[in-house]
Amino acid sequence: MVGETAATRPAQPADVAAIARLAHDAYQHYTARIGRPPAPMTADYAAAVAAGTTWVAESDGRILGFAVLLDAADHLLLENVAVDPQAQGRGIGGRLLDLAEAEARRRGHDRVELYTNEAMTENLAYYPRKGYVETDRREQNGYRRVFFTKLLR
């Protein structure tokens, strides 16, 4: 399975174009549901990579997914996670969630928080299967978001 063989590493400046392209490909089908491009489609990945907050999953030199991890005062925020549509269903997303949880522990956090758009119904079903619990729904930055938390043991 690709998810088992995909290596994760911190993103480098040379990865920015591939990350932006992957974000576009992974999120574009949500535009019609939301009524505008999802926030990850317009994010500044050059700044995220330069800040050292972005990780990639790759196999055979091809970036298959990425995650943006931000330290908060009392948790790790998984601000964005995306998988190339051609690689979905192969464990890449789970591998990136595992990375976020390992990074949270390494950084001394006892939980990971994330959010998704309420129109991304696939995510609303996926995250609970991975141990995340819905904690809130509210509008933020003009998007209807659903917030999740996973306590780390």
Image (cartoon, helix red, strand yellow):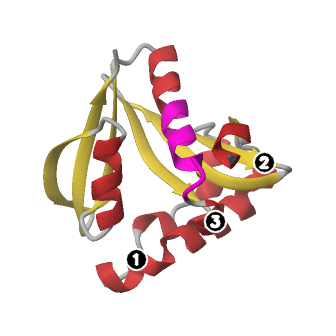
Mark earlier in primary sequence (1, 3): 3
Reading the image, the residue beneath label 1 is 30
Residue farthest to the right, as pictured: 60
Magenta segment's dominant SS is helix
Assess disc 2: are there few (<14), some (14-19) or many (≥20) residues with their C-alpha within 10 Å of its C-alpha. Answer: some
Residue 42 shows in the view: no
Lateral position of residue 97 relative to residue 149, left or right: right
The kind of residue tagged 2 is: Ser
The kind of residue tagged 1 is: Tyr
What secondary structure is found at the residue carrying circle 3?
helix
- Residue name at image x 55 percent, y 32 percent: 99
What secondary structure is found at the residue carrying circle 2?
strand
Gap in angstroms between the C-alphas marked 1 and 2: 26 Å
Horizontal and vertical percent position of residue 113:
32, 37
Q: Nearer the viewer, residue 6 or 52?
A: 6
Specify start and end residues of the magenta stretch as a single range: 89-99
Mark earlier in primary sequence (2, 3): 3
Gap in angstroms between the C-alphas marked 2 and 3: 14 Å
Q: Judge depth for marks 1 and 2 and give the one in front.
A: 2
Horizontal and vertical percent position of residue 25:
59, 73
Horizontal and vertical percent position of residue 20:
64, 65
Q: Judge depth for marks 2 and 3 and give the one in front.
A: 2
How many numbered badges does the structure rendering display? Answer: 3
Indicate yes or no whether the magenta region holds residue 93: yes
Lateral position of residue 120 relative to residue 138, left or right: right
In the rendered image of this protein, does residue 72 appear above or below residue 14? Answer: above
Assess disc 3: are there few (<14), some (14-19) or many (≥20) residues with their C-alpha within 10 Å of its C-alpha. Answer: many
Q: Are marks 2 and 3 in contact (CB under 8 Å)?
A: no
- Residue name at image x 14 percent, y 54 percent: 137
Numbered tag placed on residue 10 in the rendering: none
Reading the image, the residue beneath label 3 is 22
Gap in angstroms between the C-alphas marked 1 and 3: 14 Å
